[in-house]
Image (spheres, rainbow, N blue to C red):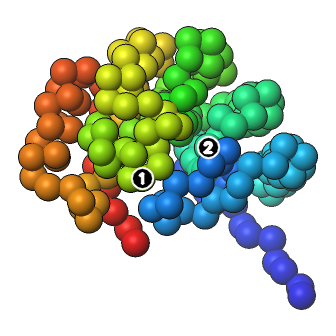
């Protein structure tokens, strides 16, 4: 197959970087993800950095970068090496990184801030303990009280802490959704994004 290299746009554009690895797969997730295997994930990050270098060699410029997944913070050392490369080559004005609630530790948040990350987006999905159990998230990330504690502790490290929520779960009713909204108002993140469940 003869593939032609893409032409770099005149103006800087946005870069999306996908890290598909998760330590455990959530049953409702419709995004491309695979079970975490350290050796495979390290190879992936190496290939990803080479691809980023190729785009730089082709003349691409990126004004903003969004790193999603999967769980981009699954291997912090690899993520930070990749972020360092992106900053050296493109110096983007904005960098966003997705993560999961179990990763909201002060050490990681401080390191993300130091790496130039301006927005951390954490997948909470719901604060409803019964829904969290049915979604196989309660054991992984904790219940409502634990999620709220982690979110409160994660505030202030980066300019924008975003909370990702999902609505339209089959067992979710209006009262559950209103309770989620009340908890969001109580914890007060910088930003909230609601997504419909995509089956």
Question: Considering the image in quadrants, where does the C terminus appear?
Answer: bottom left
**Can residue 99 be seen here?**
yes
Element type at marker 1? loop
Crowding near the residue tagged with mark 2, few <14, some 14–19, many ≥20 C-alpha atoms within 10 Å: many
- x, y (%) of residue 81? 80, 30
Which residue is at a point 16% across and 46% down the rendered structure image? Answer: 176
On the image, which quarter does residue 167 sit in? Answer: bottom left
> Depth check: 11 or 81 in front?
81
Q: Looking at the image, which residue is at 38% across and 53% down?
A: 134
Count of numbered badges drawn on the protein: 2
Q: Nearer the viewer, residue 186 or 27?
A: 27
Q: Which residue is mark 2?
A: 71
Residue 103 horizontal/vertical position (percent):
57, 27
- Residue at 72 percent across and 67 percent down: it is 7
Say left or right for 189 vs 49.
Answer: left
Question: Residue 42 vs residue 62: left or right?
Answer: right
* Distance of label 2 from label 1 (alpha carbons): 17 Å
- Examine the rendered structure and indicate whether residue 189 appears above or below residue 39: above
Q: Residues within 10 Å of mark 1 (few under 14, many from 20)?
A: some
* Image quadrant assignment for residue 78: top right
* Foreground disc of the pair 2, 1: 1
Helix or strand or loop: what does disc 2 sit on?
Answer: loop
Q: As rendered, which of 16 and 138 lies closer to the eye?
A: 138
């Amino acid at each position: 197959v003869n593939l032609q290299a893409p032409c770099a746009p005149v103006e800087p554009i946005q870069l999306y970087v996908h890290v598909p690895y998760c330590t455990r797969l959530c049953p409702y997730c419709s995004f491309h993800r695979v079970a975490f295997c350290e050796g495979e994930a390290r190879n992936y990050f190496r290939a990803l950095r080479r691809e980023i270098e190729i785009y730089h060699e082709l003349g691409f410029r990126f004004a903003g970068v969004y790193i999603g997944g999967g769980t981009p913070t699954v291997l912090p050392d690899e993520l930070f090496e990749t972020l360092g490369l992106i900053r050296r080559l493109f110096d983007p004005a904005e960098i966003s990184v997705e993560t999961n609630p179990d990763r909201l530790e002060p050490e990681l948040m401080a390191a993300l801030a130091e790496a130039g990350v301006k927005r951390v987006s954490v997948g909470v999905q719901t604060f409803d303990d019964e829904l969290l159990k049915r979604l196989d998230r309660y054991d992984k990330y904790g219940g409502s009280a634990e999620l709220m504690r982690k979110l409160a502790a994660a505030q202030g490290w980066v300019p924008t802490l975003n909370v990702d929520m999902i609505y339209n779960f089959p067992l979710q009713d209006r009262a559950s959704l209103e309770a989620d909204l009340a908890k969001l108002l109580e914890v007060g993140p910088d930003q909230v994004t609601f997504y419909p469940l995509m089956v």
